[in-house]
Amino acid sequence: MISRIFDVVYPRQCLCYCLEDKLVIGQDGQKHPLYKDRAEILFYNQCFGAKEDLIRQFNEVIKSNQNVKEPIFHIALSLHERERISKSRWIEISRECAKEMEFDQNQFVTILHKDKPYQHIHIVANRIGFDRSLAKAEFTIYRLDKFCNDMEIRYDLTRTLHPWQMSPDSDKQTLRKDQRLDRLKEVLQQTLETACDYRAFEEELKRQEIKIYKSEKGIAFLLDQRVVFRGSEAGYPWKKIEATLEQNEKLRQKQELELKQNLKPAQKQEPEEQPRLRQRIFHHF
């Protein structure tokens, strides 16, 4: 079993891709489906309906936690070309995948595609739960690899070699480098969701055993004491990191100010009560 995972910003683009037929322009100049009815929804979790219904429901939950930049998981699971399993078995596998990736209490939908020679499903999941909790996005590639190995053993599926095992030796180093870059992207994304200043950002990366090199030209990161990536390679140049940290700090200050303002009325009541009490005591005597 082969797995792929993508972090997606908007549920519409993901659900449209998974549910709509691919169109090609025919000899008559009109658009025709390349494979008609290629998608079939097998399972709903905490959601229901057609494409537009799902998009609306996902967006309603996403609004509850707008600090998340990529709130959607898009997972593809594929079998060996000569292998077939039942729809009910695909549903079982998708639910097990949701547990492994910790979004089993969230909205997700399982979609079977029929336009390829190999059998495969797509899982579109909301990382944000109804309680505003967030399914973690750390090391998703490695967690999915482990999940696929478990499913192959449990359901007696064809064991599939990892991409780096099938590649010639000359390509293995490149694949390992790509894996490190994927890990760096995940760590940077997760850290920038919570860090409010550069010191907190640096300490969290240090905890993840990632060293930072910062200069006037930009920022770079050292992984596993052997591979260096520029911030721009990971999609996080210094200007983007700096702007995100400033935005997080402003949000923190705003929340603290609102908290202080909410506490002020309660603090004022006590001094106002004291003069009235003295007046009542003086009148009594």
Image (spheres, rainbow, N blue to C red):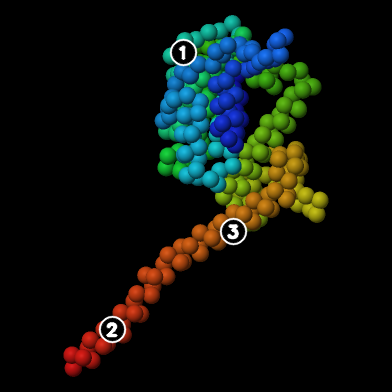
Mark 1: give few (<14), some (14-19) or many (20+) Cα within 10 Å. Answer: few
Q: CA distance from mark 2 to mark 1?
A: 75 Å
| Residue 257 at x, y percent in the picture | 51, 64
Q: Nearer the viewer, residue 156 or 83?
A: 83
Q: Quadrant of residue 104?
A: top left
Sooner in the amino-acid sequence: mark 3 or mark 2: 3
Spatial CA span between label 3 and label 1 = 49 Å
Whether pointer 2 and pointer 1 mark residues with C-beta atoms closer than 8 Å, the reply is no
Q: Which mark is residue 214?
A: none
Q: Nearer the viewer, mark 2 or mark 1?
A: 2
Viewer can see residue 83: yes
Q: Nearer the viewer, residue 276 or 68?
A: 276
Q: Describe residue 2's horizontal placement relative to residue 59 as left or right.
A: right
- The residue to which callout 3 is attached is 250
Most distant residue in the bottom direction? 285
Instruction: Quickly name the residue at label 2.
Output: 276
Question: Which residue: 56% across, 43% down?
Answer: 68
> x, y percentage for residue 256?
50, 62
User: Which numbered disc, 3 or 2, marks the residue closer to the eye?
Assistant: 2
Three-letter code, disc 3: Lys
Q: Earlier in the sequence, mark 2 or mark 1?
A: 1
Dot 3 crowding, Cα within 10 Å, few <14, some 14–19, many 20+ = few
Residue at 46% from the left image edge and 34% from the top image edge: 57
Residue that badge 1 annotates: 87
Q: Quadrant of the N terminus?
A: top right
